[in-house]
Amino acid sequence: MAHLDTAVARRLQSVKNIIIVLSGKGGVGKSSVSTQLALNLHASSPTAKVGILDVDLTGPSIPRMLGVDGHGVHQSSDGWVPVYADGSDARLACMSVGFLLKNKGDSVVWRGPKKNGMIRQFLSDVRWGDLDYLVIDTPPGTSDEHLSLLEHMAPVHARLSAVIVTTPQAVALMDAMKCLSFTRAVNLPILGLIENMSGYVCPCCGEISNVFSTGGGEEMARREGLTFLGSLPVDTELVTVLDAAEVDNSRQDGAEKKGAEVLQRYGRTSSARLFRRILESVVERLGEVQPVQ
C-alpha cells in the first residue's frame, strides 16, 4: 500500500484541486452536473487545465456527454494518455472505463476487488499532467468505489472536496442526507449542494415551471449548514447537447471535432449561463476549504 500511495501522490502531485461529485441516489443528473462543472471550469480561463475522471464503472456516461464516445485510450511510456475533449488545445482531459470496453454496449460485471483495481489504475497510471482541477464523477450512493477512491487518494486528501447533487423530491433528499453523512464520516470537505431538475425550462419562451417541486435542496442546505450552490432546471437544450449524435469512428478526427462541437454548443445553452453563477460559488468555496496554490 505504501508503494501505491507513493504512485498516486506522484501522479497527482501537479493537480491543484480535486472535486468529487456525489449523489445519494441515481437519476438525479449527477453525471450531467459533473460534465457541466468540467466544461465551465474549462471555459473560466483560456489557460485553465481540467480533467474529468469517470469512476461510475458500471454506468460510464461522461464520454458520451463530452462527445468523445468511441474514442480509444493510448498507452505511453509514462502511462495512459487521457482523451482530450477539446482536441489539440489539450486543456480538457477525460478518462473513463467506457474508453476501455471493446463494445460500448458491453456490461461491466465486476466484483469489488476488480473495481478497486480499476480505480487504482485510473489514479496511478493516467498521465494527467498539470491540472488546475480534476472533477471525479462517482456512482450513486456510497459503495466500494467511493471507499476505494478515498483510500487511494489519502496522500492528497488536503486537496479533496466534494459537491453533492440532489433533486427537490423528498426521496432524493433522504438519500442526499445519507451521502452527507458519508462525507462527514470520512472527513471530506463539502463545497456545497446543487439542486438539479428544479423545474422545467420551456424551449419556446424560457419560462421555468415547477413540474415536480422546488426548494428542497436549498432547505436541506440551510438546515445542515451547507452552502447552497444553486438550482438547475430541466433544460431540453442541454439534453440535446449532452446526448448528441455519436462520433463518426470512420474518421480519425471524429472525436476531436465532436468534442469541440459539444463545448461550443453547450456554451450557448441557458444551463451554461445558470451554471456560471454556480461556478463562482464553487471557486469561492474552494478558496475557503483548501489553501490557495
Image (tube, rainbow, N blue to C red):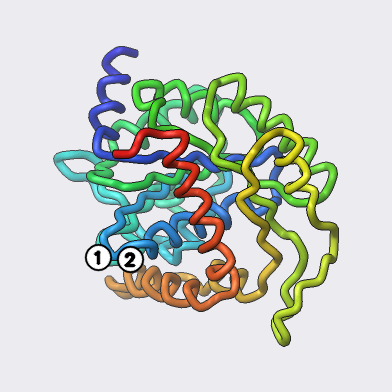
Residue 138 found in image quarter: top right
Residue 213 found in image quarter: bottom right
Q: Give the spatial CA distance, label 1 vs label 2.
A: 6 Å
Residue type at tag 2: Asp
Residue type at tag 1: Asp
Residue 11 rendering spot, x and y as whole percentages: 26, 33
Tell me the residue that label 1 is attached to.
Answer: 89
Question: Do we see residue 146 in this rendering?
Answer: yes
Choose between 262 and 273: the one closer to the eye: 273
Choose between 178 and 107: the one closer to the eye: 178
Image quadrant occupied by the N terminus: top left
Choose between 160 and 111: the one closer to the eye: 160
**Tally of numbered tags:** 2
Farthest residue, direction bottom: 204
Residue 182: which disc? none
Q: Element at badge 1?
A: helix
80 w.r.t. 89: above or below: above
Image quadrant occupied by the C terminus: top left
162 w.r.t. 243: above or below: above
Q: Are marks 1 and 2 in contact (CB under 8 Å)?
A: yes
Horizontally, is 143 left or right of 264 in the view? right
